[in-house]
């Protein structure tokens, strides 16, 4: 046998994990700029002549198509290998952003940003999620908390950059630049995934059907939905919400950046905490934290209170998201991670097209967000109750 080094995929466990994590990081950071969508609200309203409710629809469509892409991803292993799937999906996302950059109105913006960017991003995301989990050898909760933290981290980085670019260049050049970044990130992630030897099925062959966990999935689904409904409203309209409560443009931009940072840290922490204290306790505490934020803003409305409330809702959403990601591996195993995650993310999709859209419509009608905050509070209260009923350990098969 030759002692010459192999030029194929890295066969060492640590090397494969490092390459897989690098691929996930490179692609998910720019895809996560969808969470900084609120920065584009006023420029898009001015440039395209669209309403806040119509932009909420575009944001919701992007989330819906992302979820569709996640559910299509696990069906594609027989059609192509991981690098080919990543190359195709990220090219679709970059094309969608290019169409958004040239959009004359709502229809093309929805097609580009909503359909193509969302669908391509969802396929790429689930391919990397499944591939990474099959490469991991330990610390799955922490690793998956890190994975889901990348989206808000991308928005945290993107929001101030977008704010600067919009002021310096305007809307269309900013979106064109984002399209180029997506194309470059997709190419690099494809290369790293190939070097890591990523696959979508275990080396031993196709996995058996997931073991039934009676009652756990619907409760996780509802808990995630309720947290995401409030969290996505914050992510999609944070800048507009702060301004509606009397905050300056600078405060609104700073709040958008800070909230995405809180969510990123909370997602990472949620996975770590779920490994130690169980998802039930983490999720109940997270919903209680968000509920306290809702009550604070309703009782003491104002720009700085709004920033604090957005941060508390963001932390609650992040903790639920991170602990949900960790619980999938505990209840169903790594070989089923992508499939179960895709199904759970239907809750995320449903959340994106409910409260965020309602919040936008209520703003158009009333000029404020008090009604949306009240609805979020009701949801968080229900989330506390449902999370408290979740088993602390996986149910018996």
Image (cartoon, rainbow, N blue to C red):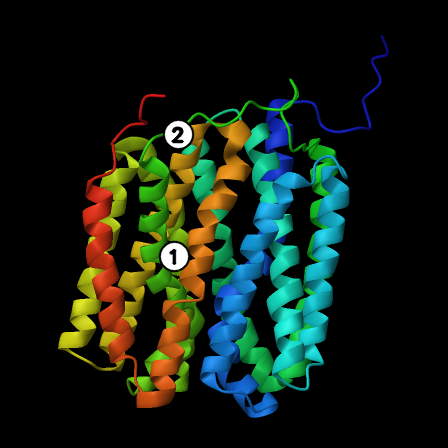
Q: How many marks?
A: 2
Residue 40 location (% of width, % of height) = 53, 79
Q: Is residue 220 above or below residue 364?
A: above
Q: Earlier in the sequence, mark 1 or mark 2?
A: 1
Please name the residue that numbered disc 2 is placed on. 331
Q: Is residue 339 visible?
A: yes
Residue 184 location (% of width, % of height) = 73, 58
The part of the image, by quadrant, that contains residue 308 is bottom left
Q: Residue at image x 47%, y 37%? A: 143
Question: How would you rate the neighbour count of disc 2 (Cα within 10 Å): few for under 14, some for 14-19, many for 20 or more?
Answer: many
As helix, strand or loop, the secondary structure at mark 1 comes to: helix
Please name which of the two marks, 1 or 2, marks the residue nearer to the observer: 2
Q: Is residue 288 above or below residue 191?
A: below
- Distance between the alpha carbons at the discs numbered 1 and 2: 24 Å
As helix, strand or loop, the secondary structure at mark 2 comes to: helix
Q: Nearer the viewer, residue 223 or 238?
A: 223
The part of the image, by quadrant, that contains residue 396 is top left
């Amino acid at each position: 046998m030759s002692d010459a080094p192999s030029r194929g995929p890295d066969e060492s466990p640590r090397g494969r994990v490092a390459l897989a994590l690098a691929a996930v990081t490179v692609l998910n950071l720019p895809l996560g700029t969808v969470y900084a969508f609120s920065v584009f609200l006023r420029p898009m309203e001015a440039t395209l002549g669209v309403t806040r409710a119509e932009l909420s629809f575009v944001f919701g469509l992007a989330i819906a198509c992302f979820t569709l892409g996640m559910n299509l991803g696990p069906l594609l292993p027989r059609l192509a290998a991981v690098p080919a799937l990543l190359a195709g999906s990220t090219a679709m996302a970059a094309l969608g952003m290019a169409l958004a950059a040239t959009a004359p109105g709502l229809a093309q913006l929805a097609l580009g940003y909503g359909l193509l960017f969302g669908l391509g991003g969802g396929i790429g995301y689930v391919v990397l999620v499944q591939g990474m989990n099959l490469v991991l050898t330990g610390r799955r909760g922490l690793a998956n908390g890190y994975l889901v933290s990348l989206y808000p981290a991308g928005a945290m980085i993107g929001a101030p950059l977008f704010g600067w670019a919009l002021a310096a260049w305007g809307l269309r050049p900013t979106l064109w630049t984002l399209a180029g970044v997506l194309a470059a990130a997709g190419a690099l992630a494809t290369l790293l995934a190939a070097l890591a030897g990523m696959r979508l099925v275990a080396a031993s062959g196709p996995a058996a059907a997931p073991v039934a966990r009676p009652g756990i999935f619907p409760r996780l689904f509802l808990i995630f939905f309720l947290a995401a409904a409030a969290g996505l409203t914050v992510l999609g309209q944070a800048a507009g919400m702060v301004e509606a409560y009397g905050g300056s443009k600078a405060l609104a931009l700073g709040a958008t950046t800070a909230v995405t940072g809180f969510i990123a840290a909370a997602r990472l922490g949620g996975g770590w905490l779920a490994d130690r204290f169980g998802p039930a306790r983490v999720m109940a505490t997270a919903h209680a934290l968000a509920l306290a934020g809702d009550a604070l803003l309703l009782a003491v409305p104002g720009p700085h209170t709004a920033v604090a409330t957005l941060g508390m809702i963001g932390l609650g959403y992040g903790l639920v998201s991170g602990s949900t990601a960790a619980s999938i591996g505990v209840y169903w195993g790594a070989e089923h991670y992508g499939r179960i995650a895709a199904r759970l993310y239907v809750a995320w999709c449903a959340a994106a097209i409910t409260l965020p859209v309602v919040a936008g419509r209520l703003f158009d009608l009333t000029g404020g967000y008090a009604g949306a905050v009240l609805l979020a509070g009701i949801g968080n209260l229900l989330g506390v109750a449902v999370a408290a009923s979740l088993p602390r350990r996986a149910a018996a098969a």
